[in-house]
Image (cartoon, helix red, strand yellow):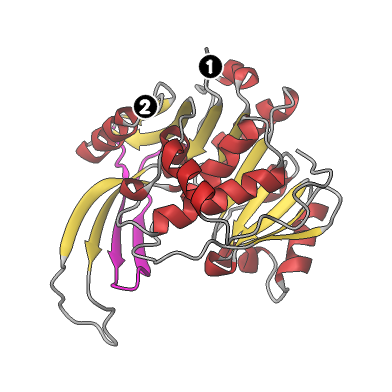
Amino acid sequence: MGAALICLGHAALDHIYRIAAFPPAPVKLRALSALEAGGGMAATAAVAAARLGGRVAFWGRVGDDLAGEAIRSGLAAEGVDVAGLRRIPGATSSTSAIIVDAAGERLIVNHRGEGLAPEASHLPLAEVGQAGAVLADLRWPEGALALLGAARAESVPTVLDIDTDPGPLLPRLLALCDHAIFSGPGLREFAPGLDPEPALRRAQAAGARIAGVTLGGEGYLWLDAAGRLRHQPAFRVPVQDTTGAGDAFHGAYALALAEGRSAAEAAYRAAAVAALKCTRPGGRAGLPTRAELEAFLASTPACPKDEMIHADDAR
């Protein structure tokens, strides 16, 4: 049986340091704690979906170094299928330093790795037709183009995680995209000077059926397939660490689509998963299980669903 969700893109090894507060000027600081953990946008989204009980495969690239082995073993330990994670001889894997303050805000410095060849002909695209949905970020655009193209040919829903520095292939990817989900900075870079709604309409005009933007504590703003502006409020929770919250949202959203849920229901569940993640330290360490998600939703009626969730939501 194939994966219900295929995630493709960035996998990294994160070094996470907690501090009391960010200094006003460059100084030497002592970390309150230190943690090494797997990271990367699509890879963390894959773990988020696996924690929720999904059958998930991750396709990506790492180097033949210690970081690459740690990345692979970390994903496998979470139950993610890593047969499509290619180790490239002579390459170095992506690593990040993440500094988190007492308020849960973070600074991320990422090295994207070296020698990670863009070629994607090795991908097992014949498996795409068995998936319920696919998700890609933009760190491996050639792979994303291959995955989204195969998914479109098989009528499998596609989700694209769009952050900053999208690269020249973004227009072709948007043309293959059912659900384009931007970060706030990513949307501003895509449509400089525009407010979120006209910026999202630009993304729809470029080919995305549904276009949305994650706005942290302001929730998730999106245009449905009919072009109606929608809003999923954020759940109000005590924040410890926002690391990985956006990735958690994407993974939960894509898994919900793979399970046959509507875009609005996917946004509601994804917002809850992201909120739960923010209540706990660490990126992947804070990701909830399916049981924790359902218990949270059952006990937290204060956050409304999208106002049109019972309307004819396009999937």
Q: Is residue 224 above or below residue 151?
A: below
Q: Position of residue 219 (x, y in %)?
A: 60, 63
Q: Which residues are magenta?
A: 90-118
Q: Position of residue 92 (x, y in %)?
A: 29, 42
Q: Position of residue 85 (x, y in %)?
A: 40, 28
Residue at x-position 55% and y-position 54%: 271
Q: Residue 315 bears which disc, if any? A: none
Q: Residue 2 bears which disc, if any? A: 1
Q: Amino acid at mark 2?
A: Gly
Residue at x-position 27% and y-position 30%: 73
Badge 2 crowding class, 10 Å Cα cut-off, few under 14, some 14 to 19, many 20 or more, is: some
In reply to whether residue 94 is colored magenta, the answer given is yes
Residue denoted by label 2: 79
Q: Give the distance between the C-alpha atoms of the residues marked 2 and 1, in whole angstroms.
A: 13 Å
Q: Is residue 34 above or below residue 175?
A: below
Query: Circle 1 sits in a helix, a strand or a loop, which is it?
Result: loop
- Between 40 and 79, the one nearer to me in the picture: 79
